[in-house]
Image (spheres, rainbow, N blue to C red):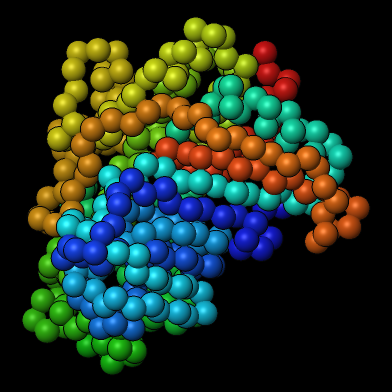
Amino acid sequence: MKIKCRPEDFRVEELPNIEPGDRGRFVLYRLTKRSIGTPEAIEAVRRRWDLPPDAVRHGGLKDRHATTVQYLTIFKGPERSLHQSNLDLEPVGRVDQPYAPGCFRGNRFTIVLRELSDAEAAVALKAASEIPRDGIPNYFDDQRFGSVGPSGDLIGRAWIAGDHERALWLALAEPNDSDLPDDERQKAILRDLWGRWTEAKAALDRSHARSIVTYLDDGHPDDFRGAFARLRRDLRSIYFSAYQSHLWNLVLGRFIEDLTRPGQRIPYAFRTATLPVPVGLDPEQADRLASTRLPLPASRTPLGDDDISAMARSVVLEQGIAWEDLRVRHLKDVFLSKGDRAAMFRPSGWSQSGLVDDELYPGRKALELGFDLPRGAYATLIVKRLTDASGAGTAS
């Protein structure tokens, strides 16, 4: 079974809940992108139009390996289009406030599963019949952890633990699967010359990383905290969101373990942890999972005396940090979100084609699925469920 054989095999469209008009300080744009991540697309727009870092605001990150549609605003932006090989930006009106996560209600997905054998097709069809009924655990999926390199260490964890040099090294020097060739070379230089800032500055091309090294070389050789603060704000926000998401995933995993019997869960390998996915739930268990919201790990999220609060506090403490210490110190422009998140989600607007002959893989089948998900839910979790559904069929 294969997914994302072509960008159009995985399509995502943001569902905004705002209506643009012909007045407002912010121009609203429709961004269509292909095979490029949201941060990279926004950076391309900024460079093309010479915009300051905070001028562009968006609601969410969309998959790199897909065809996606999302919306963004630019303060007093130009009312003209921008077309490049992997993105199209079109103005659609004006609004009074910058675009933000609260400006869209969810996403519409269309995905195509390819190269299905007869057995895989049967498994996928069975799972497709169960997902609308059983729902999916609302984990943050691997896209959330694109900043995590081969060490498995999270930049946000290092910073919150007070290891500012480690946080900076992870951000600037650790290799990453998504690195372009220029990034790979720059990071290799930094790994070889870390701490020898004059040599590193001379060896690096003009880049954001070189500007950070210039700061360290210019009389601040050990000010890793100040250097980290000079990283782009959008990147620092991603780093801390990834760490908070990892902790929340661990809390949900523990909740599922406590809720289920051993035969009712399948271990799924995520980028930062192996976590349980429930199957074959009793009605009471399914109702409990569907009605539960779990706290987002942050000192600003208050905990009570209930069992869920005690469990969340315990899970975080096992990672070596107290709940009250989950805060971003020394940085005033990024923070850990407060609140809670649903433990599971159910897709709406579910549709599926019948099996068809796969034009890319003769002798195999293809299956197209369409569905809407609430904001923050990951369609790739549905793909995981479709591909691992054979385990669910044997659970009891």
Q: Nearer the viewer, residue 184 or 16?
A: 16
Residue at 53%, 67% in the rendered image: 34
> Looking at this rendering, what residue extends furthest in the right direction?
363
Quarter placement of the C terminus: top right
**Residue 130 occupies which quadrant of the picture?**
top right
Residue 335 place in picture, x, y as percent: 18, 48
Q: Give the image quarter of residue 222.
A: bottom left
Judged left or right of residue 169, residue 371 is right
Height in image: 356 above or below 84? above
- Considering only vertical position in the picture, is 3 above or below 320? below
Instruction: Tell me if 378 is positioned left or right of 81 in this view.
Output: right
**Is 372 situated left or right of 343 in this image?**
right
Name which residue lies at 33% across and 31% down: 341
Name the one closer to the observer, 257 or 389. Answer: 389
Residue 39 placement, left or right of 286: left
Q: Is residue 174 visible?
A: no
Q: Nearer the viewer, residue 205 or 162?
A: 205
- Can you say whether 314 is above or below 387 in the image? above
Q: Is residue 58 above or below residue 194?
A: above
Quadrant of res 164: bottom left
Which percent across, then down, holds residue 10?
Answer: 60, 55
**Which residue: 73% across, 42% down?**
353
Q: Position of residue 349 (x, y in %)?
A: 55, 35
Kindly tell me whether residue 323 is visible in this rendering.
Answer: yes
Task: Check the image and name the residue furthest to the bottom.
Answer: 202
The residue under the point 58% across, 31% down is 267
Viewer-side residue, 180 vs 125: 125
Q: How many marks?
A: 0
> Residue 283: x and y, percent?
54, 9
